[in-house]
Amino acid sequence: MEVGCSDHFSRPLVTLITRRRDDLTDDTTTTPPVLVVQHEDGAGPGLVGERLRAAGLDVRTVHPWRGEPLPGSLDGWAGLLVLGGSANCEDDTAAPWLPRVRELIREAVTGPAPNPVLGICLGGQLMAHALGGRVVRRPQGPELGTVPLRRLPDADGDPVFGAVPEGALAAQWHWDEIGTLPPGAVPLLAGDDCPYQAFRVGPHAWGVQFHPEVLARTVAVWAGADDAHVRDAGLDPEAAVRSVREAEPSLREVWGAVAEAWGAVVRGARVPVPAPSRRE
């Protein structure tokens, strides 16, 4: 999978009912699901999805490349998670669902009822492009394996990336990168070879260039698929996989905590919905 970022959804109501000691009144809320857009096989929500589910969020993945339809709007969804993939963020011919994804991102960020968003690699590039930024091909070639990241001043106090330590390693697998952030976007993390590794747009939307969701097993599959492309770029795919495998404990700790922090934002934006009256 040369990355350009290079379950069929439904809307069930999950209801928690508390029976009070003195009466039979229901104290009920509904947790809307998080919409996950997966662009291709082998590029699922991984560690991020695992931590969101562990936090009690209902994570629903749509696979548009299989013909599964994306929703017409984000009504009834608690958040939007857009994953990575091999398509360029403007290649609507190879991935004809991308215009709809860009529309959902714009709805989530600028619509009348904003939703928390997290865009990963291609997802972050789609966010930047949809909101007025620019994505470019890396002239120096792909960035692969683990790379240390630097905190930027606006990371302090950020509800999702505020606790990321200086020099945290992040898994990379991309041929394209964000060249210009959207108007009003705030850079949060940078790398020596890629200036926009994490950014925020408004109070509730984040994009990243790296892959917080992956560990060595997934990267090994990508390396096998992209072996010729990687070697043509003068890089060693086995070394890239090895760097991710050696960093797995810190990847799990740092980016698992970031996933949980984004999940907390999603839960904080949840709106309680009254339950129907109980029939005796």
Image (spheres, rainbow, N blue to C red):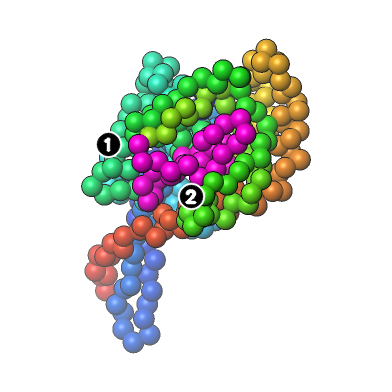
10 Å crowding of disc 2: few (<14), some (14-19), many (20+): some
Outermost residue, bottom direction? 22
CB under 8 Å between discs 1 and 2: no
Identified at 38% across, 74% down, the residue is: 18
Front-most of residues 60 and 79: 79
Report the residue marked by disc 2. Answer: 154
- For the stretch drawn in magenta, the main secondary structure is strand
Report the residue marked by disc 1. Answer: 72
Looking at the rendered image, the quarter that the C terminus falls into is bottom left
Identified at 48% across, 50% down, the residue is: 154
Q: Quadrant of residue 19?
A: bottom left
Does residue 190 show up magenta in the picture?
A: yes
Front-most of residues 277 and 211: 211
Of helix, strand and loop, which one carries label 2? helix
Compared across the picture, whether 8 is left or right of 75 comes to right
Please state which amino acid type lies under the numbered disc 1: Gly
Q: Quadrant of residue 239?
A: top right
Question: How far separated are the C-alphas under marks 1 and 2?
Answer: 34 Å
Q: Which residues are magenta?
A: 183-212
Looking at the rendered image, the quarter that the N terminus falls into is top right
Front-most of residues 235 and 196: 196
Compared across the picture, whether 174 is left or right of 126 comes to right
Identified at 39% across, 66% down, the residue is: 16
Outermost residue, front direction? 153
Rendered position, 135 above or below 190: above
